[in-house]
Image (cartoon, helix red, strand yellow):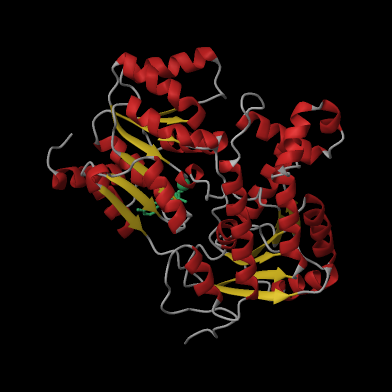
Amino acid sequence: MPTSLPERLVRARAVLAHHYGFPDFRPAQRRVIQSVLAGRDTLAVLPTGGGKSVCFQVPALVLDGLTVVVSPLLSLMQDQVEAARRRGMAAAALNSALDATEQRAVLADVRAGLVKLLYVSPERLERLAAGLSTAGVRVGLLAVDEAHCISEWGHDFRPSYRLLLAARIRLGRPPVIALTGSATPAVRADITTSLRLGRAGRCDLHLASFDRPNLWFGVERVTDHRDRFRRVLTSLAPRQGTAIVYAPTRRITEGLARSLHMAGFRSASYHAGLDRNRRHDVLTRFLAGGIDVVTATSAFGMGIDKPDVRVVVHWMLPATPESYYQEAGRAGRDGEASRCLLLFRKGDAELHRRQLDVTFPPERMVERAWKDPNQLAGLPSNVRDSVERLRNELGAGGEGPDWKAVRLRRKGAAARIAAMERYATTSRCRRRELLRYFGECLKRCSGCDRHPLQP
Ligand code: ADP
Ligand code: MG
C-alpha cells in the first residue's frame, strides 16, 4: 500500500478510473474515502443513489489486507458481488445461499489472498471472524452497508446486527466504515455507539445533504378509493416520462393497473407475489420505457435505477418517512423536475397504528400463547407469526423475557408513523418537514405545495 495519504488518494483515483471508468469521485465520496484511507472510523450518510459502494470498494483495493463487507440482504449481496466482479475486482460472498463445499472454497480463496472484498451476512460474520483470526488473515477494513439495520430506531432493525462489535474485536479491531442512506440523529448515535466508532475521537462523520432540489413534494387529502383513483389519473395526465404508483397491498396494485389500462395507459403491477419471470419482465419493460405506469408495493425497489421517472404517487400514507423518501426519491434521478405526490386521509395513519398491534401483540397475550398451544392456535395467522418471531428473539424459558428492546422498537415504529402523519398534515413547508426528520435544517425550499416553485 502507498505509505502517504496523498499517494493513497492518487492510487484511489486510478482504481476508480480503471475499474469503474468514472473520471472522478463525487465530492461526498472524496471526503469519505479520504477518511477511510487515513485509517479513521467513518460514518457515511449519503442518500440512496449517492454512490456508497464506491466508498468502500475503492479503499478495499488500495488498502492492505482483506475488506469484509457486512450486507443485510442475500439478493443485494449477490448483485453487488457480480457487479464488482464484472468490474474486475476480486470479490466473493459468504452466506447461507452457498452449501458447505462452496463456503469452504470461498474461504480457501480468502486464505490464499485471492479475495480483496468479502461480502458476508451479519449472521455469518461471527463465525467468519473466528475463522479468519485462526487462519491469520489480516482484515484491513470492515464495511457495514445499510448500517441503520443496527439501530432499534432504524426502520429495518435486525437483532444480529447487534453482534457486530464483538466480531470487530475478533477481527483485530480494523477501522470501520458504516454506510447508510437513511439516518436520523438517533440512528446515527446508535450506529456510532454500537460499533464503538472512533474511540479517542478518531471517527469522521460525513453527512451529505438529502435535499433533492428537482423534486416537488405535495400532499392531497382524499375521501375514499374513488377519489384516490381520480387524483392518480390527474397526476398522470401530463403523460411525461414514466410514473410509479406505490400502493399498500398486492390486490390494490393489480386493480389499479387494470383501471389504468382501461384509461389508456400502458400499465403493469409489481409485487412480491408475482413469479420471478413476471417480475423480471415488468422490470425490463419498465427500464426500457415500454410501460407508462408501474403500480407497485414496496417490493418494487432494488435495481430501480431509471433516470426519467417523472411522477411517484403514493396511494396511501407509508408507515415511515424513511420508506417514503426512498420510494418518492425514485423520481427524477436525472435531475429534471419531477413530482412526488402523497394521497392521504386521516384513517391511513390509524391503519398503520393497528398494524403495530399485529407486529407487537400485547406482552401478556404473547407470553400466554408461548405457554399454551391452544391459545396460540386460536390467534390470527399474522399475530401467530409475531408470537413465534418474538419467541425466537426473547426465548420463552428462564426467568421471563426482557421486553425492553421490543418496547423500544414499537415506540420507534409509532414515532415514525407520527412523523409521517405530521408530514401529511403540516401547514408548513413539506420539504422542510421531511428533511428535518433526517436531521437536516433546510434554508430554502425549491418547490412543494406550500411553496410555489421559485423562478
Ligand atoms: P448507493 O449505495 O449510495 O445507493 P450506489 O453505490 O449503488 O449508491 O451508486 C449509485 C449509482 O451511482 C451507480 O449507478 C454508480 O455506478 C454511480 N456512481 C457512483 N460513483 C460515481 C462517480 N464517482 N461518478 C459517476 N457515477 C457514480
Ligand atoms: Mg448501496
Seen in the picture, residue 342 relative to 16 is either above or below; the reply is below
Rendering coords of residue 108 (x, y %): 39, 14
Between 344 and 408, which is closer to the camera in this rendering? 408
- The location of residue 127, given as percent across then percent down, is 44, 20
Q: Is residue 213 left or right of residue 21?
A: right
The residue lying at 52 percent from left, 37 percent from top is: 72
Residue 92, image x, y percentages: 43, 27
Residue ID at (34%, 46%): 55
Is residue 369 visible in this depiction of the protein? yes
Taking the view exactly as shown, the residue that stands out farthest to the front is 399
Quarter of the rendering occupied by the N terminus: top left
Q: Is residue 147 left or right of residue 293?
A: left
The correct choice, above or below, for 166 with respect to 38 in the image is: above
Residue 26 visible in rendering: no
In the rendered view, tell whether residue 56 sits above or below residue 376. Answer: below
Q: Is residue 379 left or right of residue 415?
A: right
Residue closest to the eye, 150 or 110: 150
Query: In the image, is residue 173 above or below residue 53?
Result: above
Q: Quadrant of residue 132?
A: top left
Q: How many marks?
A: 0
- Residue 251: % across, % down: 82, 52
Residue drawn at x 42%, y 22% as measured from the top left: 128
